[in-house]
Amino acid sequence: MTDRAGHIGTPHLREGALRHLAGRGDFVSDQQLPRMVHAAFLRSPMAHGTIVSLDLDEARASAGVVAVFTAADLNPRCADWTSQLDHFVGMTSAPQNMLAAEEVLWVGHPIVMVVARTRAEAEDACDKIFVDFEELETVAGIDVALNADTPPAASGVDSNLCYKNELKTAGVDDAFANAALIVEGNFAFGRHTAVTLEPRAIIADHDPATGQLTVRHGTQTPFQFQDVYARHFGVPDHKVRVIAPDVGGSFGMKLHVYNEEMATVAAALILNRPVKFLADRLESFVTDIHAREHRIHARMAFDADGTMLAMDVDDVAPIGAFSAYPRTSVVEGNQAYRLMGAPYKMKEYRGQLTVLFQNKVQTSQYRAVGHPIACQVTEALLDRAAAELGIDPWELRARNVVPDDAYPAESATGYRFEKLSHEASLQKLRSLMDYDGLRAEQTALREKGIYRGIGLATFVEITNPGVAFYGVGGARISAQDGAVVRLTPGGEVHCAISVTEQGQGTETIIAQIVADQLGVAPSQVKVTTGDTDATPSGGAAWACRGAGIGGETALRAGRKLAERITDIAAALLQADPANLKLRDGAVVDRGTGEVRLTLAEIGRIATYRPDTLPGGVDHSLSVAQHFAPSGYPFGFTNGVQAAWIEVDTETGLVTLLKHWVVEDCGRIINPLLVDEQIRGGVVQGLGAALFEECLYDEMGQLLNGSLADYLVPMAGEMPDIVISHIETPTEDTILGAKGVGEAGTAAAGAAVLNAVNDALHPLGTRLTQTPMTPARILAALGIGQA
Amino acid sequence: MGPGRVVNIPLELRVNGDDVAEFVEPRTSLADFLRDKLQLTGTHLGCEMGVCGACLVLLDGKPVHGCLVLAVQAAGSEVQTIEGLSESGLVADLQSAFHERNALQCGYCTPGMMMTAHRLLETDPDPDRATIRRALSGNYCRCTGYEAIVDAIATTAARRRTEAAQ
């Protein structure tokens, strides 16, 4: 029907990027609306306490103030939210609302909302609020939270245990009992955060005449927020419009419910005018979700020839004083303890997950949820075993990965894999990085007192999530997406689709896919995203689903329209549709390629002269299509990363010399965009490995809440990253694409941890805590304190 | 006049070649002035403490952090923002190279990157990769991993040298 050779698989450039290069981005933080007012919040200065009194008189009288709201004013407008997923049996979390009424739960918990003509005036008024607190016992840190005598971090729960579960295969005890070698380690992961360069931003407006609530929101999931605002504020969902224009980074951080966004909506519903909240950087550090704080003890069992038999993992994961909504803070730990050992044909497993409350800002899903934890623990233990067994680390991996011809396969924790390519990926990496040459170079340099290391990390990544992720747990989070594709009266194409764009290139790949179904160029396909009034409903951007699920939605919609166009043309030409196809913007004869009718002519006739079509021919030039993944619960991808680094044993500084990634995300739609997703992901993983940590004291005070104190990777410290691919398309879809956005982050930290330990091996020490700061490296070398 | 009201003071300067005369609160930063008063929203705010580089503008030809300079400090000066720099055509080749190399994703840091890249190539027409990486050390990007940005700047430098040699 269509001549589909064309744009899928080519490095088509992102049209949308040109606006940003000219300074013409359209971020919520940039937007100004008529009659708009600005919000600021008075926040808790302590991690846990009771509000004794609140004096708002001076604030109310402050210049420019439009309204001052307390919990008593605002919270009754909004139904409480309680974090819950039914498949986490026994999980608990206290109900939350926008402003702290009596109890404050973390440093930064909003207490009073001030709305004023300018943000500066709103902040001035916040300074004039007087609050008396009584301090309550603070839960900050794992040991405090584990202590049964510690009072709960929030009065709405009975203890500091949010969730506990164990996975255990029948033969795990025997496997350890009969093992020739058991390696073990204690691993610690620093709490870190997304640091999107554009902080969270929202403008809510309400029109009392129509009941319309319009929310401009820097989010990756507009439909989820349409549903949240509708249900929690009692507005029918068709009267809630969420618009997500340009979003300055999201990485999973911008899909959670936050007190400030909810309060901004509530204020707009009361004031009936646009209310804007834009987090400043300190507010971002104390209210954006954090992630990845885990303390893990893990063991790995081998037989004498280096076959990995089993793992035993005890993961303790402290979150905030409550679990995040609507996805829960348990998901991260749940993925961490289920992904352990996932690339390997290890048969036996025991894993225990303990999720704890503490008085810090909520944790939740951030790019590569749980993956870096599982990967780092698994790969570090594997390297220890390699050293003990005297087997090369690459070789030990090659012996233990699930063979490429052994699919479908299932992990010891129950994850099902359709088809992965670990063996091919390892082989490709070996030659790509010249593994043997690097080993020789490393040995030669060691003789000169230069400590270089090679670190390998094999990984799988969860992508294309079906309803098993959240839907089955009762969360109103869509696993399906929807698109409307139409031929314009002028013969061009428009695609409105529910997946969203945050710079990863979603709109570009959708244009490529639709173009190939209709025989046009991607530049002839306009793609609209990020507006609940403009596109069908769907899950949007989370857990690597834009290409695999959004792309398949677009493909099927495009094919449906191609069929419609062909039928119209066949009717007009009195031809057999089977003898026609679409190519170069026209309906052509399948055999000769002769142009029979241009798309412009079909657009004209179907729009302005449908009367000239034979009776019964459907002249609708718009088609709708929804798609939800079926078949495998998740579309797993795989890959392997390698790091080449040098440790300065006098300063503890790590120099990243080079990094390699071999990745298999199935069908590649746009190689340019795929590679840049991987590079960006790797660098976020490197940040966690070497720099990024939200440091707290025992009173729950964040000590480094600024971009001068919290270190993120900078250009000068980052290596060049070499990328190569294996392409194993999924057969669950026509398109065959899987996700790629989190692959880089999943394994970069593990590769660098192994590389640092490889470099330090001759010195008889190793690190098990990230970030690997210079102080921690020196401490491992016996110099100073960590 | 309510309590705590401050008196706005007059400010005259040139922005992107145009004369501008406004009244501002003395505490207003140059970045807030450009964004809120003049609606030149290409200048972004990422950290508000002179670290991330998203707010870089050219003040009398040199990059400054718009978040650290008060608007009144720019009185009598010439300010160029990304909007002006883009329309001047001086960075058209840089913009093309960034586009071709996909050296931006969300785009929030991009205006600051253009400022740094423009200034670097003005002062050093033949920077090696390490020099480019060092020059970018005051510009945070959370999306790209930087390599594509380094590539785009290196490509532009090479193209300019080739053109200059012809």
Image (cartoon, rainbow, N blue to C red):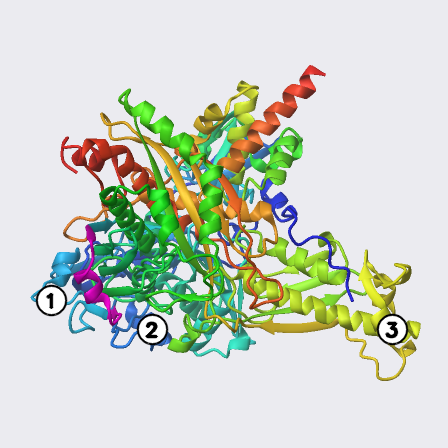
Report how far apart the C-alphas of labels 1 and 3 lie in the structure.
75 Å
Mark 3 or 2: the one toward you: 3
Task: Give the amino acid type for the residue marked by disc 3 in the picture.
Answer: Ala
Q: Does residue A411 show up magenta in the picture? A: no
Circle 1 SS class: loop
| Residue tagged 1 | A151
Q: CA distance from mark 2 to mark 1?
A: 23 Å
Range of residues picked out in magenta: A166-185
Residue with the mark numbered 2: A81
User: Which mark sits nearer the N-terminus, 2 or 1?
Assistant: 2
Q: Tag 1: residue type?
A: Pro
Q: With A61 as the anchor, is A141 left or right in this view? A: left
As helix, strand or loop, the secondary structure at mark 3 comes to: helix
Q: Nearer the viewer, mark 1 or mark 3?
A: 3
**Residue A372 visible somewhere in the drawing:** yes
Query: As shown in the figure, which amino acid type bears the numbered disc 2?
Result: Trp
Circle on res. A570: 3
* Front residue (pair A15, B25): A15
